[in-house]
Image: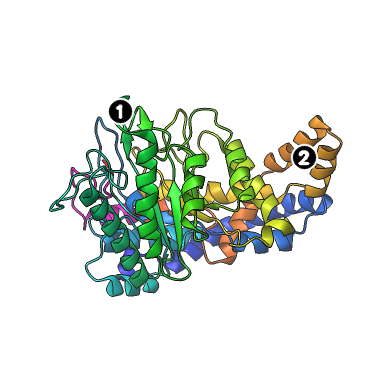
Amino acid sequence: MSGHRIASDLVDQWNQKLERSHRRDLAGVSGILERRGISIRGLLDSLAGFEVAVPSWGFGQGGTRFGRFPISGEPVTLEDKLFDAAVVNDLARLTPRVSLHIPWDRPSDARAIRRLARSLGLGFDAMNSNTFQDQPGQSCSYKFGSLSHTDRGVRRQAVDHNVECIEIGRELGSKALTVWLADGGSFPGQQHLRRALDRVIGSLQEVYSALPGGWRLFSEHKPFEPGFYSTVVQDWGTSLMIAQALGPKASCLVDLGHHLPNTNVEQVVARLIAANRLGGFHFNDSKFADDDLSAGSIRPYQLFLVFNELVDAAADPVVRKARPRHDPSFMIDQSHNLKDPLEDVMLSAIEIQRAYCKALLVDREALAGHQERNDVVMAERVLKQAYETDVSPLLAETRLRRGGAIDPLVAYRRSGYRARVARERPVRGGSSAGIV
C-alpha cells in the first residue's frame, strides 16, 4: 500500500532545496501585510483550517461528446481513486475528503473502503446520485426524466436510488447528498412546466424523509443541457423553492459553471446567504456556459468575489446566529480533458484556497465605510488591493506547516507517480471516472 504514496522523506528533501527562497518570499509578503495591519499568524491559522473535497470521478481523463483521449495510469477501481486522492492531499494538504458518485463508485464493501480511506488520511464528503443515465439492469428508463417523470414507477426507482446513496453514505461516514437532475424538455409542449416541478418536489420530499440526523441535502441547478428547451431545476430560484419546500436540512448547491454567460454569480451567492440556504459549491470554471474548466483558469476575479461574500458572511453576527448554521461545503467538480487529472485537481484546490486567502485580506471596515459614503472608486480599490496581493508564499507556508510540499507540482512530477501507476493500470478506452 505504501508503494502507492509519495514518500514523505522525498517531499522533505525537495522542500529543503526550496526553503531558503521560500523564506525570503514569505518575509516580503509578511512585511507588506503587517504594514496594512494584518496579522500573519491569524491569517495562517485561517488558511490551515481551509479544506475542499475532491470528486472520485475527477481522477480519470474526461472527454467531450466528440471524443476522449485516455491518459496512462488512470484509476480502474475505487481503491485506485482513493490512492490518487491521497497523493493530492499529501502534497497540497487541502483535500482530505472524497465525494463519491453512485453507481459509478458503488463500493462492494463500504466498511473496507472506509478503512482504506482512513489509512490514507481521507474521509468522505457528499454523496452524488445519478438519475441522468440509464444503468445496466434497471427496470425503467430515465429518457424522459427521473424525479419529474410522469410515470410513478420511474419516480419510485429514482427515489430508491437516492435513498440507496444515503445508505451507502452512512456506512462511509458521509453527511450529505447532492442531487443534480437532467430532467427537462427539448421541445415546447413536451412537458407540463408546473407539474414537472411539483413532481420533483414530491419525489425529493420522500428522499428528504430518509435523511439521517445531521445530514443535509443539496439541490443543484443547471440552466440547460440536456434539456435544451426547459430544464426543471434551471436556476438558483428554483433550487431555493425546492429547499424551502423540503425543510431546514435542504439547501442549494452553486456550481460556478452552471450559469448563463455573464451571470453575477457572487450576487447569487449573496442572495442564498440572505435566505440561509447556501449549502455549498462545485468549483470549476467556464468560458461560455459549461462547467468543465479548471477552477480559476478563466475568471479568477469572480472566484475571489465569491469568497469575498463568504468571508463577509462569516464575520456577520446575523449570519452566524442563523439556524441552520451557515456552513457551506466546498468541492471541486471539473473535467480533465487535456491535463493530468491529479495535477489539475491539485492546482485547482490551490487556486480555490488562493481566492479564499485574498478575500481574508479585504479591509472590511474600510470597505463598509466607502460603501456607506457611496465612494465607488475607493470601495473598488479596497477589493483590488486584496486581489492583487501575491499570496503564494502564504499558501506555501500553510502547506509546509501541515507536512505538504512547498511546490506540489514539482514534487508530483519528480516523484514519478504517474509512470509508476501506469505500469499497474491498463489504459482503457472508456472513462474509468464515469464521465464520457
Left or right: 220, with 45 as reference point: left
Name the residue that disc number 2 marks: 382
| Residue 276 shows in this picture | yes
Q: Nearer the viewer, residue 278 or 42?
A: 278
Name the residue that disc number 1 marks: 186
Q: Position of residue 231 (x, y in %)?
A: 38, 35
In front: label 1 or label 2: 1
Query: Magenta residues?
Result: 417-434
Compared to residue 298, the image places residue 275 above or below, namely: below
Q: Which residue sits at x=58%, y=59%?
A: 327
Q: Amino acid at mark 2?
A: Val
Q: Quadrant of the C terminus?
A: top left
Left or right: 16, with 130 as reference point: right
Left or right: 176, with 435 as reference point: right
* Callout 2: SS: helix
Q: How many marks?
A: 2
Q: Nearer the viewer, residue 131 or 373?
A: 131
Give the mark nearest the N terminus, 1 or 2: 1
Q: Amino acid at mark 1?
A: Ser
Q: Which mark is residue 154?
A: none
